[in-house]
Amino acid sequence: MKNKFLKSALCTLLALVLLFSCISCGKNEEESRLKTPDGIAVKDADSLMESGGLSLPMGVYKLMLSIQKGNMAYFINLHYGSHDSAAFWDTIIKSPLTTADQYYTEAIENKAKSLLASALLFEELGLSLPSSVTSQIDSEMEALVNEFGAGKKSVLENTLKEYGFTYDNIKSYKHLAAMSEYASNSLYGSDASKIGSDIKQKYLEDNYFAYRQIFLSNQYLVYKTDANGDIIYYDGNGNVAYDVINGSPKVGSDGKFVYYTEDGKIAYDTKSGLPSPVYDEDGYQKTEEYSYEQILKRIELAGELMELGAGSEEMFESLVSAYGEDGISQKITTYVAGNISYSSMGDSQSYEFLDAVVLKLAEMEVGELTLIQDESGLHIIRKYALEEGAYANKNYSGWFVDKTYGVYDFNENLKYDLFNEALEPYREKIEVNEELLASETLKTAKPNYYYH
């Protein structure tokens, strides 16, 4: 009887052990049901965003915040004394009542969603990263360990704890970025060669304006002058170039002929000769401001040119050649993008002017003229029709690819817009842990200058 009871008890105990073992296994399976796009298991508690079994862990998001904080830290420190300054982060910069912290943090949230959406599209397209790309990521991770961990991953991991992300988070982020780029290039070509010319032309028409201008500067360049204050013209050998056809010759004090006009001034050959610039100590040609009276006359001239230029395109271009004082618009039409901020390229007056031009052009019809006055001078602007395929015309390449600041690139901007459109259905399916999301913002993030 005892044996039967003992046997029954043992069976019951074994069943309970198996039951709890299965429950435990179920929990482990539940905990590892998610993975990063590069195959690393993610616990539910660590998953910030998920869709289709793929997860973007909170650690990757913290990494992204820290990188952005590092990018912004110098500016904030310079102007506000500390990269955590409430005077910057709590300032309302956009209505309705959006602080700098909310605005820039939301941008990172959207970027994180786009990365996860890219990974979902990447999978659906059946793509895989080339070994050259994964090898490059491995090499970059090894370099991080060597540089910041003295060759030991554990040492690096210990440092990364201060930021709230891990070695695996950095690697996942690199994979996500690579997948995003690879998916975009797969759809559109690395050079946008897979995008049809009809789509490019429509993008040009939707986002660009063309214009030419007559520029009347508030300053004039300084050249060597004679005793009368007239600019001296020289030939290719450095000798004074006289107008020997229209001038009257007289023997000078050195025994050489000097040619004069009827009013007694020296007659220079202004067509074949060239003026000699006067340079400052830094090697730049000197400039002088026009007087107030001269500025008023130039404003009056601008009004006259507006009337004359309102006629045909040919008439306007002849005025550009005759009166324009900037070299660029005298030669080719200028193209400006209406969907970017040129001022973001720097503090240069010319960038602010381009933003002002864009606003004006958006209100104008082709062939219409307007006058813009800024610190540099007077700009008589005429809106031109967009040329077919202008984005591929080498004469205009400087207006479609910004090689200095990278702010605008016609093909890359078009790819970005098309790719974002393609990602939208995937973004909509992403589930976000809002409580986890709210636990970290750019204001609280630690600036990251090295670990990415």
Image (cartoon, helix red, strand yellow):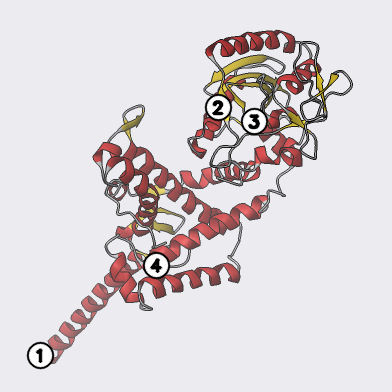
Judge by depth and name the residue closer to the eye, 63 or 194.
63
Let me know if residue 100 appears in the view: yes
Judge by depth and name the residue closer to the eye, 334 or 118.
334
Dot 1 corresponds to which residue?
Answer: 2
The residue sitting at 57% across, 10% down in the picture is: 296
Q: Nearer the viewer, mark 2 or mark 4?
A: 2
**Quadrant of the frame with the C terminus:** bottom left
* Disc 2 element: helix
Q: CA distance from mark 1 to mark 2?
A: 99 Å
Dot 4 corresponds to which residue?
Answer: 168
The residue sitting at 19% across, 79% down in the picture is: 12
* Of pointers 2 and 4, the one earlier in the residue sequence: 4
* Of pointers 1 and 2, the one earlier in the residue sequence: 1
Q: Nearer the viewer, mark 1 or mark 2?
A: 2
Q: CA distance from mark 4 to mark 3?
A: 43 Å
With respect to residue 193, does 272 lie above or below? Answer: above
Judge by depth and name the residue closer to the eye, 77 or 217.
217
Dot 2 corresponds to which residue?
Answer: 353
Binning the other alpha carbons within 10 Å of mark 4 as few (below 14), some (14 to 19) or many (20 upward) gives some
* Of pointers 1 and 3, the one earlier in the residue sequence: 1
The residue sitting at 67% across, 16% down in the picture is: 365
